[in-house]
């Protein structure tokens, strides 16, 4: 996984999903004109005849990304809607364009201070509105790129780059949280420690790229054998950890056996080569408050037993 070198702005082609726009305007004739223009430009349009209806529309998801608000309208007025929208600090950002017949600088300042992004004085030409909306789309697109970059950084901070599963630090945090949660509710937590058998030999014979492919495929097979709320991560090298909320030793052992069988069931094919892979698994579980380090030590000891007894097997302590 690599980070993009530059922040890209999505294009506005017809193949892109139409931008959702809310128009709040109490003048029926002006609403009709805006409806004709905006739908002709490919926007997905929602109309509101007053501020109260506009605020109702802004509650459910998905919400409009761009708001066109009249300065004065019945119900909740324009400044109040702007304040409410900005108070939510919603992500993704909503772009606010005010339309008004007022032209004093004080009114413009009041609108911008209330949370608006732009101000357009009535009457305005069709092309001027279209240009203002294009500016709004550029800002929304840039914001979307920033959100994607932030999420990419967040993913990289918590996931293993090679396999896409949790990394060691994030998984140990999840394990600690799960142990704390289980202790409050007298629950049980299972822990599996997996080690690929003779992995060094795979790297030596087939190369490190093949070894990387083996790790990715093993991670995929493990994920298929666990529940959606279980956690699997790369502990280091060819070792994996699986955290099993609510599982006792018997249930944890059953999951470990499913994983072991799934990993060994078929060779991993890489560039036409069939590479047999097996795993040894140490199993433990705790039903009372436990220290993360102690639990890991027990799982590691169980793994050592599985390896010393011949590998490609599970052992429970």
Image: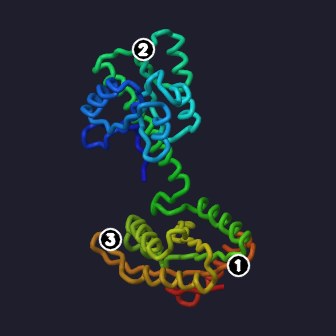
**Disc number at residue 270?**
3
Instruction: Give the mark, 3 or 1, whose residue is nearer the N terminus.
Output: 3
Residue 121 lies, in percent from the top left, at: 40, 15
**Disc number at residue 118?**
none
**Left or right, 48 with reference to 243:** left
- Helix, strand or loop status at disc 2: loop
Instruction: Give the mark, 2 or 1, whose residue is nearer the N terminus.
Output: 2
Quadrant in which residue 208 is drawn: bottom left
Residue furthest to the top: 104
Q: Is residue 309 above or below residue 90?
A: below
Q: How many marks?
A: 3
Residue 311 lies, in percent from the top left, at: 52, 86
Residue 30 lies, in percent from the top left, at: 33, 24
Quadrant in which residue 209 is drawn: bottom left
Q: Is 219 or 307 nearer to us in this picture?
A: 219
How dense is the environment of label 3, judged by Cα within 10 Å: few (below 14), some, or many (20 and up)?
some
Q: Looking at the image, which residue is at 47% across and 46% down?
A: 60
Q: Nearer the viewer, mark 2 or mark 1?
A: 2
Q: In the rendered image, is residue 130 in sight?
A: yes
* Residue assigned mark 1: 287
How dense is the environment of label 1, judged by Cα within 10 Å: few (below 14), some, or many (20 and up)?
some
- Helix, strand or loop status at disc 3: strand
**Left or right, 230 with reference to 94:** right
CA distance for labels 3 and 1: 42 Å
Q: Looking at the image, which residue is at 44% across and 24% down?
A: 70
Q: In the rendered image, is residue 134 in sight?
A: no
* Residue assigned mark 2: 101
What color scheme is it? rainbow
Q: Is residue 16 above or below residue 30?
A: below
CA distance for labels 3 and 2: 68 Å
């Amino acid at each position: 996984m690599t980070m993009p070198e530059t922040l890209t702005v999505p294009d506005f082609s017809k193949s892109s999903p139409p931008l959702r726009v809310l128009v709040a305007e109490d003048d029926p004739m002006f609403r009709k004109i805006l409806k004709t223009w905006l739908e002709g430009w490919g926007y997905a349009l929602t109309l509101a005849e007053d501020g109260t209806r506009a605020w109702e529309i802004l509650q459910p998801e998905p919400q409009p990304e761009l708001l066109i608000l009249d300065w004065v309208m019945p119900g909740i007025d324009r400044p109040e809607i702007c304040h409410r929208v900005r108070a939510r600090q919603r992500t993704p950002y909503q772009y606010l364009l005010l339309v008004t017949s007022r032209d004093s600088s004080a009114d413009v300042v009041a609108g911008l201070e209330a949370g608006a992004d732009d101000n357009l004085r009535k009457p305005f030409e069709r092309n001027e509105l279209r240009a203002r909306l294009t500016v709004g789309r550029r800002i929304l697109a840039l914001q979307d790129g920033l959100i994607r970059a932030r999420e990419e950084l967040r993913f990289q901070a918590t996931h293993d780059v090679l396999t896409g599963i949790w990394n060691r630090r994030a998984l140990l945090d999840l394990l600690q949280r799960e142990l704390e949660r289980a202790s409050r509710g007298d629950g049980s937590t299972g822990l599996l420690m997996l080690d690929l058998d003779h992995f060094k030999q795979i790297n030596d014979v087939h190369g490190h790229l093949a070894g990387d492919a083996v790790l990715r495929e093993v991670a995929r097979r493990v994920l298929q054998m666990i529940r959606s709320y279980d956690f699997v991560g790369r502990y280091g090298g060819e070792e994996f950890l699986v955290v099993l909320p609510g599982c006792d030793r018997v249930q944890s052992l059953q999951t470990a056996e499913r994983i072991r069988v799934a990993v060994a069931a078929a060779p991993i094919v890489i560039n036409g080569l069939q590479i047999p892979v097996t795993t040894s698994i140490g199993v433990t579980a705790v039903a009372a408050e436990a220290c993360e380090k102690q639990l890991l030590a027990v799982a590691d000891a169980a793994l050592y037993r599985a390896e010393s007894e011949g590998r490609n097997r599970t052992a429970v302590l």
